Image (cartoon, rainbow, N blue to C red):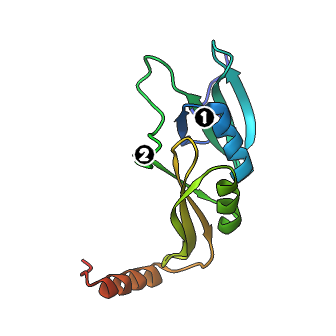
């Protein structure tokens, strides 16, 4: 008898599951915006996509249709999702541009951040909130801490 590993060798350890009203549309969004690669697609009893498995830069993500009797639901389309997905890409500006071209809305415009990332927040057409980022500068802990204190001082807040 062979011993099974608790974590499959070809699997991500942490894997987001995005519940959607239209799983096929979400899979297309991920392909277009992030260059996601489809690994698996399963139809439900109605013939529509019920489950999809994809990778974004080698990391797995599941795309799921809502199921009656299952407690997870797609986010509301007002941007109030309680979960955000953070993804690094090579070029944040191009990724956000691609996302908008297929219906995403910009929630937070692309800006350079004190810790060394350039980020923007979008809401995809299914209501999921994504933070898309590219590393533009390697910073030390000391630099990040000082920049944080400087930001707080500019805003009139005290750092602890």
**Residue displayed at 53% across by 68% down:** 109
Q: Which secondary structure lies at badge 2?
A: loop
- Image: 99 above or below 36: below
In the rendered view, tell whether residue 43 sits above or below residue 60.
Answer: above
- Residue at x-position 60% and y-position 34%: 63
Marking on residue 81: 2
Please identify the quadrant where the N terminus is shown.
top right
Measured in 3D between alpha carbons, the distance from the residue under mark 2 to the one under mark 1, in whole angstroms, is 16 Å
Which quadrant holds residue 91? bottom right
Q: Nearer the viewer, residue 9 or 29?
A: 29
Q: Position of residue 126 (x, y in %)?
A: 55, 41
Q: Which residue is mark 1?
A: 63
- Residue at the far top: name it: 45
Please state the horizontal and vertical placement of residue 13, each as a whole percent of the image: 56, 42
The quarter of the picture where residue 145 lies is bottom left
* Residue 35 drawn at (x, y percent): 75, 50
The secondary element bearing badge 1 is classed as strand
Q: For mark 1, does the 10 Å Cα neighbourhood hold few (<14), some (14 to 19), or many (20 or more) residues?
A: many
Relative depth, front residue between 95 and 117: 95
- Identify the residue at image location x=52%, y=45%: 128
- Rendered-image quadrant of the C terminus: bottom left
- x 42%, y 84%: residue: 147
Q: Left of 131 or right of it: where is 30?
A: right
């Amino acid at each position: 008898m062979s011993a099974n590993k608790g974590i499959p060798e070809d699997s991500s350890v942490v894997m987001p599951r995005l519940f959607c009203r239209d799983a096929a549309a979400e899979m297309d969004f991920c392909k277009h915006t992030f260059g996601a690669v489809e690994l698996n697609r399963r139809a439900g009893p109605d013939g529509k996509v019920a489950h999809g498995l994809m990778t974004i830069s080698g990391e797995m993500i599941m795309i799921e249709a809502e199921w009656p009797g299952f407690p997870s639901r797609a986010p509301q389309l007002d941007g109030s999702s309680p979960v955000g997905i953070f993804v690094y890409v090579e070029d944040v500006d191009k990724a956000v541009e691609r996302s908008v071209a297929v219906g995403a809305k910009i929630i937070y415009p692309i800006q350079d951040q004190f810790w060394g990332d350039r980020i923007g927040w979008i809401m995809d057409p299914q209501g999921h909130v994504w933070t898309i980022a590219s590393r533009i500068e390697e910073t030390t802990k000391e630099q990040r801490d000082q920049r944080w204190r400087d930001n707080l001082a500019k805003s009139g807040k005290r750092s602890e």
